[in-house]
Structures are given as C-alpha cells and as structure tokens.
C-alpha cells in the first residue's frame, strides 16, 4: 500500500511524532510513530480498517527498528508485522502481514 506522511512534528525534547496514512480498495491504515532524538522507536500504533473490520495494533519498542533519517521501519507484534520503506519520491510503501491471515498482505 502506498502511504504518505500527513504529520511530522519535532518536539522540544528532540523526538519526532509521525502519522502515516494510506488506503486501497481493501484497507485504510494510519500508523502513528514516536521516534526519539537518537532514532530509537518510543511508540508505534497502527489503526487499521480491513474488509469492514476495525482494529488497533500496538507495537512494543523493543520489537521495532528505525533506520536513519530515511524512514525504514519494521514493526512486529503478536497480531502481525508492518514494514515501511521510503521511496525516492518521498511516498512510503507499507507492507502489512496479519498473523493467521496471510491473504491480507498489502
């Protein structure tokens, strides 16, 4: 799924608050990230509407990786996995794999 950053705010403490949204014919997604000054992930939450159902998936910071200024994020939770990779044009590719539902890969 192609996504875009709709909010990117730097906080006084140096952290970065991001909201990334995207949709296609099957799913609507909003990923909220808090990245610390040193690049470590502090918080991550995915709100997902998929085939008429809505869910929120929270990710533990110790299961996530944030790589550099170019957004390249890999998140893992019991419910599934989300990977974000930044394109050259600035848009982002979001790949979603839900646990137990491989047919919902995006």
Image (cartoon, helix red, strand yellow):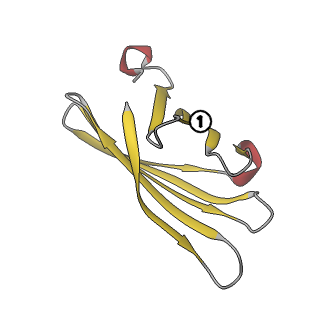
Could you tell me how many numbered marks the image carries? Answer: 1
Estimate the x, y position of residue 76 in percent, counting from the top left.
Answer: 63, 37
Q: Which residue is drawn at 76% across and 58% down?
A: 39
As drawn, 29 above or below 19: above
Residue located farthest toward the top when viewing the structure as drawn:
103
Q: Where is residue 24 in the image (x, y as percent from the top left)?
A: 25, 31
Camera-side residue: 32 or 68? 68
Return the x and y of residue 18 as percentages of the image width and height: 51, 61
Residue topped by disc 1? 78
Image coords of residue 54 (percent x, y): 28, 45
Could you tell whether 69 is left or right of 31 in the image? right
Helix, strand or loop under label 1: loop
Quadrant the N terminus occupies: top left
Outermost residue toward the front in this view: 89
* Residue 83 location, quadrant: top right
Rendered-image quadrant of the C terminus: top left
**Res 29 visible:** no
Q: 84 left or right of 21?
A: right
Left or right for 74, reference 7: right
Give the residue at x 71% y 82%.
Answer: 13
Camera-side residue: 37 or 97? 37
């Amino acid at each position: 799924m192609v996504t875009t950053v709709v909010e990117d705010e730097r906080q006084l403490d140096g952290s970065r608050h991001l909201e990334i949204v995207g949709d296609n014919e099957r799913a609507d997604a909003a990923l909220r990230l808090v990245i610390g000054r040193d690049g470590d992930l502090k918080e991550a939450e995915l709100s997902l509407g998929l085939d008429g159902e809505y869910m929120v998936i929270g990710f533990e910071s110790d299961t996530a990786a944030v790589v550099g200024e170019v957004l390249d994020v890999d998140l893992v939770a019991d419910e599934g996995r989300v990977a974000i990779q930044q394109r050259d044009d600035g848009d982002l590719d979001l790949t979603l794999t839900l646990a137990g539902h491989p047919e919902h890969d995006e």
